[in-house]
Image: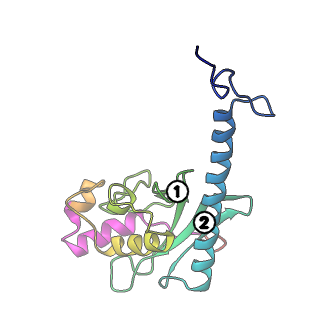
Amino acid sequence: MTTANPTTAFPAASIDGQSPKASVSASGQASSAANVAKRLQSELMSLMMSPPAAGISAFPESDSDLTYWVGRLEGAEGTVYEGHVYAISLRFPPEYPYKAPVVRFESTCYHPNVDLHGNICLDILKEKWSPALSVSTILVSLQSLLGEPNNASPLNVEAAELWDDVEAYKVELAKHYQPLPEDE
């Protein structure tokens, strides 16, 4: 004689009428969102308390959405980008920090590793991303990329070809650069 296993005889239901899997999934998403928010709040505080380098900043666009940040990036001294300031955006996915944010130049940036739409070719934003990296790391890497492009992997082939001719590059860069309004 066999007896029914009471734990499998009837499908379980939660109090709200959802299956246990749906309840776990919903609570897992809420927990994940809370973890992302906690991580981003921590990174924001770190940026505010000790900026990683001169001329770079980023912060949430609004208090109600920590997953969309805007920032400014100044070209480093001694580079062809010195004196230039660019607007950037960072969109953090629900899987952050296990998945890299989407980072774009919102203002026009003539550069070998930036396309016409502001997309950036930077290994730490793609295959070299690690949860150990942070917004500070991204900002410093972007500022460094301005002066030291990876011409082996260009998104803007014209800029990559001009890079070694500094004077010609500066002329072309000046044609594309648009200063940001002071109030941004």
Determine whether 75 is above or below 133 in the image: below
Tell me whether the residue at label 1 lies in contact with that at label 2, contact meaning CB atoms closer than 8 angstroms.
yes
Check the picture and name the quadrant holding the C terminus: bottom right
Q: Which amino acid does label 2 sit on?
A: Leu
Q: Is residue 103 magenta?
A: no
Q: What residue type is labelled 1?
A: Tyr
- Residue at figure coordinates x 68%, y 23% from the top left: 11
Along the viewing direction, whichever of 26 and 47 lies nearer the viewer: 26
**Within 10 angstroms of label 1, few (less than 14), some, or many (20 or more) residues?**
some
Along the viewing direction, whichever of 14 and 81 lies nearer the viewer: 14
Residue 59, x across and y down, in percent: 62, 69
Along the viewing direction, whichever of 48 and 3 lies nearer the viewer: 3
Image quadrant assignment for residue 111:
bottom left
Tell me the SS state at disc 2: helix
Tell me the SS state at disc 1: loop
Reading the image, the residue beneath label 1 is 96
- Residue at figure coordinates x 56%, y 68% from the top left: 71
Image quadrant assignment for residue 15:
top right
Q: How many marks?
A: 2
Magenta part, dominant SS = helix
Which residue lies most toward the top here? Answer: 1
Q: Decide which of tag 1 and tag 2 comes sooner along the chain.
A: 2
**Within 10 angstroms of label 2, few (less than 14), some, or many (20 or more) residues?**
many
Residue 23, x across and y down, in percent: 69, 38
Determine whether 4 is above or below 130 in the image: above
Residue 122, x across and y down, in percent: 34, 61
Q: Does the magenta stretch include residue 166?
A: yes
- Residue at figure coordinates x 46%, y 54% from the top left: 99
Residue stretch rendered in magenta on the structure:
161-180
158 horizontally vs 14: left or right: left
Query: Which mark is drawn over residue 40?
Result: 2
